[in-house]
């Protein structure tokens, strides 16, 4: 699994360097001297709180996955799954691999890989991950709406490109939610439309392996339909999982807000800073770039430069993004590697115990 991702890891590092270089060299508000002075004078407790916000970003998704797995893998007699799930590991894998690859859902196969090694059936893990993605998408739409309501003037004050990127991101997320609702209500209609589009693409020689694409659509619809059944049967469980996903988004938003406060920001502008970060989270879905690098930096600076007491939007962006994204990537790869090693040891002990039991029998 890891070897296949090496090219994406290299691309991630290249994009990271290019993004930081673009902020440092192209932004007129960047000043290394001012950054050093600002960091020296920053409130350390707010910075610590920002790091805690980054940690909660990983923990809340892990809690959502743990909750869904424990609730939805119960048998009819109420017994839980025989192997305890490790939501933190699944969350770290999802966040890390989603960040280094263009697709925002690329972390799901990595999470499924670790779930399978924990003994969770592939069919169940696939449905749980799709369900969590739907809740995650719904939480992002809510965050986007909240961001616009908090600071509509900030959005309209951004340049045209920034406004378009945020609008595209919001339409994309809203489209995913709409597709899910249509699958709930018009399952066959969605299936026929998807097959028709693939057939048209095949005729125009834009799509190869037509049947495999159709099979994927049918599989996806079955998974979404299973999710809808689970939602109807486990409304309280879904509500709690959605809350965890929403808190995960707020934890990520809080990092920028807390760094702003650490740099001496005014409490009166907290709504604007919060709104800016909410809009950024939506805008990064406008382009298929690993981790939204470049797009997130551009949008964040575009929003922060409109807040009157932000002396250097570039400096604030570099530190907040460094904590919320780059530090998070470093943390998640450590969790993934350690989790992989511990999981391998557990599997070895399990096999040895089974072997000994077979010998005794």
Image (cartoon, grey):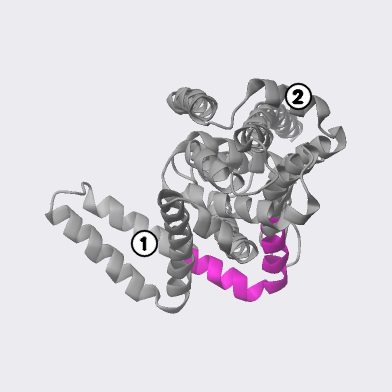
Q: Local crowd at mark 2 within 10 Å, few (<14), some, or many (≥20)?
A: few
Residue 86 seen in the current view? no
Give the labeled residue for mark 1: 218
Place of residue 47 in the rendered image (x, y in percent of width and height, measured from the top left): 80, 35
**Along the horizontal axis of the image, is 210 left or right of 105?**
left
Query: Which is more toward the observer, 100 or 89?
Result: 100
Magenta-drawn stretch contains 9: no
Residue at 79 percent across and 40 percent down: it is 264
Label 1, label 2: how many angstroms apart (C-alpha)?
Answer: 57 Å
Single out the mark in the foreground, 1 or 2: 2
Q: Is residue 221 above or below residue 159?
A: below
Q: Is residue 78 above or below residue 343?
A: below
Which corner quadrant of the image does residue 152 belong to? bottom right
Q: Is residue 282 above or below residue 338?
A: below
For the record, the magenta segment spans 224-245
Query: Which is more toward the observer, 27 or 169?
Result: 27
Give the labeled residue for mark 2: 37
Q: Main secondary structure of the magenta part?
A: helix
Residue at 62 percent across and 43 percent down: it is 115
Magenta-drawn stretch contains 231: yes
Residue at 54 percent across and 49 percent down: it is 122
Query: Which is more toward the observer, 278 or 261?
Result: 261
**Along the horizontal axis of the image, is 308 left or right of 47?**
left
Place of residue 351 in the rendered image (x, y in percent of width and height, measured from the top left): 68, 31
């Amino acid at each position: 699994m890891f070897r296949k991702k090496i090219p994406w890891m290299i691309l991630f590092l290249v994009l990271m360097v290019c993004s930081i270089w673009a902020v440092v060299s192209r932004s007129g508000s960047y000043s290394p001297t001012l950054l050093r002075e600002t960091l020296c004078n920053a409130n350390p407790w707010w910075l610590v709180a920002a790091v805690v916000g980054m940690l909660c970003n990983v923990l809340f998704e892990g809690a959502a996955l743990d909750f869904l797995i424990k609730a939805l893998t119960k048998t009819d007699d109420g017994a839980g799954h025989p192997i305890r799930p490790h939501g933190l590991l699944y969350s770290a894998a999802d966040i890390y691999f989603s960040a280094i690859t263009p697709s925002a859902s690329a972390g799901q196969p990595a999470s499924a890989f670790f779930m399978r090694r924990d003994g969770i059936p592939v069919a169940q893990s696939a449905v749980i991950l799709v369900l969590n993605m739907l809740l995650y998408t719904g939480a992002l739409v809510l965050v986007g709406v909240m961001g616009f309501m908090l600071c509509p003037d900030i959005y309209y004050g951004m340049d045209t490109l920034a406004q378009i990127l945020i609008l595209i991101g919001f339409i994309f997320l809203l489209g995913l939610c709409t597709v899910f609702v249509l699958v709930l209500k018009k399952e066959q209609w969605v299936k026929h439309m998807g097959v028709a589009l693939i057939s048209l693409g095949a005729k125009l020689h834009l799509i190869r392996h037509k049947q495999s694409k159709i099979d994927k659509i049918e599989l996806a619809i079955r998974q979404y339909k299973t999710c809808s059944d689970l939602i109807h049967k486990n409304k309280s469980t879904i509500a709690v999982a959605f809350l965890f996903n929403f808190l995960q988004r707020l934890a990520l938003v809080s990092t920028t807000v807390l760094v702003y406060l650490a740099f001496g920001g005014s409490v009166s502008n907290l709504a604007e800073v919060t709104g800016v970060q909410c809009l950024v989270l939506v805008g990064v879905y406008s382009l298929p770039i690993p981790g939204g690098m470049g797009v997130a930096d551009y949008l964040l600076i575009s929003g922060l430069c409109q807040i009157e007491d932000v002396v250097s939007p570039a400096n604030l962006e570099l530190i907040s993004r460094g904590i919320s994204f780059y530090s998070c990537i470093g943390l998640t790869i450590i969790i993934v590697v350690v989790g992989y090693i511990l999981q391998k040891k557990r599997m070895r002990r399990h096999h040895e115990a089974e072997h000994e039991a077979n010998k005794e029998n």
